[in-house]
Amino acid sequence: MAKQKQVTLTQLRSFVAVARQGSFTRAAETLGMSQPSVTAAIQQLEQTLGLTLFDRSTKTLRLAAASRSFLPAMERVLNDMDTTLSGVQSIVEGQSGHVAVAVLPSVATRILPETIKGYSKAFPGIRLALRDDNSFGICEKVANGEVDIGVAGRTDQVMGLEFEPIIRDPFGVAMHRSHPMASEQGPVRWQELAAYPFISFASDTGIRPILDSLDPVPENISVPWVEVSNIATVLSLLKANQGISALPQMSVDPRDRDIAFRILIDPPKFRELGLVTRKGRSLPPAAQKFVDYMKAALRPYWERGPGS
């Protein structure tokens, strides 16, 4: 069985250009091709289709009757192809696409709004989908491909991930405004927390390993009166004056009239938050643009720490 000849884009573009311009010379100029190349493309297309596309004379060039019927279809094919290629190029260049991001609630409320505002102005063609979770949940979402990128605390509980630190968030003690520790200002030593009921975090959070790394660990921290899985629950308990907790600074809104916050020292502790991605997997162009933008926007949080 003879192999069927294929129609090429060059042939189609040459045909449409000649039909629109009514001249091989003007068509060649429009396409940025030589006239012999356009002529050859038309001849090849005629051979492939088995018909004459143009009625030629020494002074005129007209569409043949047979080719008038399918010129609109050819134009639609080229327009659709150009639109598709333009869209693909836009995706390749990171100017359009879809990015799914999972972040900690504190990042979502304190940092992300301004970052997204700037990003959306720079890349209006990219759509964002945001999810919030604790560090373990974020890492799971990245690992199973539910999101492209995560912003979470470091965790070793989920394998196959890469972690790049971008935020250094200092710990402090948080308490109700009426608590005795709220009557003073300035730093607080970890050992000073021993006298009060402590609200801690479950082992699957990014904060608990940091608290457990204290040497020595105050007894009320190692054996807290209550453990929770997210910062929102801690804040609710603090608002009810049910104890104290050690929280990263970003977790506490300085405008909150119910909760006071003092930096902890001896030793100072920091929560490292980073960009979480799947190991060995390249990001889609739009997601890489988001990563690059976020790293630049959040650099001060790594160099100085929030509130400094």
Image: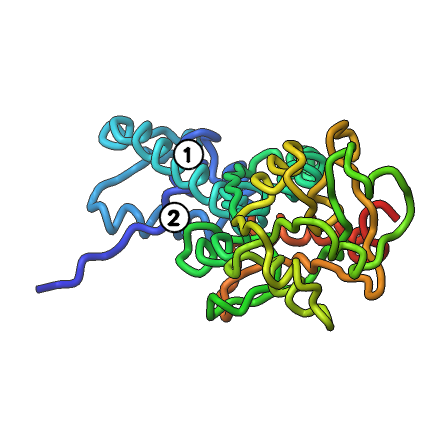
Q: Quadrant of residue 106?
A: top right
For this view, does 18 lie left or right of residue 243? left
Amino acid marked by disc 1: Asn
Q: Which residue is mark 1?
A: 79
Q: Residue at x 73, y 55 (%)?
A: 167
Foreground: 36 or 179? Answer: 179
In the rendered image, residue 4, in percent from the top left (x then y), is placed at: 18, 57
Mark 1 Cα within 10 Å, few/some/many (few <14, many 20+)?
few
Mark 2 Cα within 10 Å, few/some/many (few <14, many 20+)?
few
Q: Nearer the viewer, mark 1 or mark 2?
A: 1
In the rendered image, residue 54, in percent from the top left (x then y), is placed at: 33, 35
Query: Quarter holding the N terminus?
Result: bottom left
In the rendered image, residue 230, in percent from the top left (x then y), is placed at: 55, 46
Give the answer, above or below, for where 242 lies relative to 40.
above
Foreground: 217 or 171? Answer: 217
Q: Answer yes or no: is residue 34 visible.
A: no
Amino acid marked by disc 2: Leu
- What is the spatial separation of the Cα atoms under label 1 and label 2, in whole angstroms? 12 Å
Q: Answer yes or no: is residue 235 visible.
A: yes
In the rendered image, residue 111, in percent from the top left (x then y), is placed at: 70, 41
For this view, does 138 lie left or right of residue 74? right
Q: Residue at x 45, y 53 (%)?
A: 141
Q: Quadrant of residue 65?
A: top left
In the rendered structure, which disc, 1 or 2, sits on the residue that comes first in sequence?
2
Foreground: 118 or 10? Answer: 118
Q: Which residue is mark 2?
A: 9
Farthest-out residue, front: 195
For this view, does 17 lie left or right of residue 195? left
Q: Residue at x 41, y 34 (%)?
A: 79
Q: Secondary structure at mark 1?
A: helix
Q: Residue at x 30, y 48 (%)?
A: 45
Give the answer, above or below, for where 228 lies relative to 276.
above
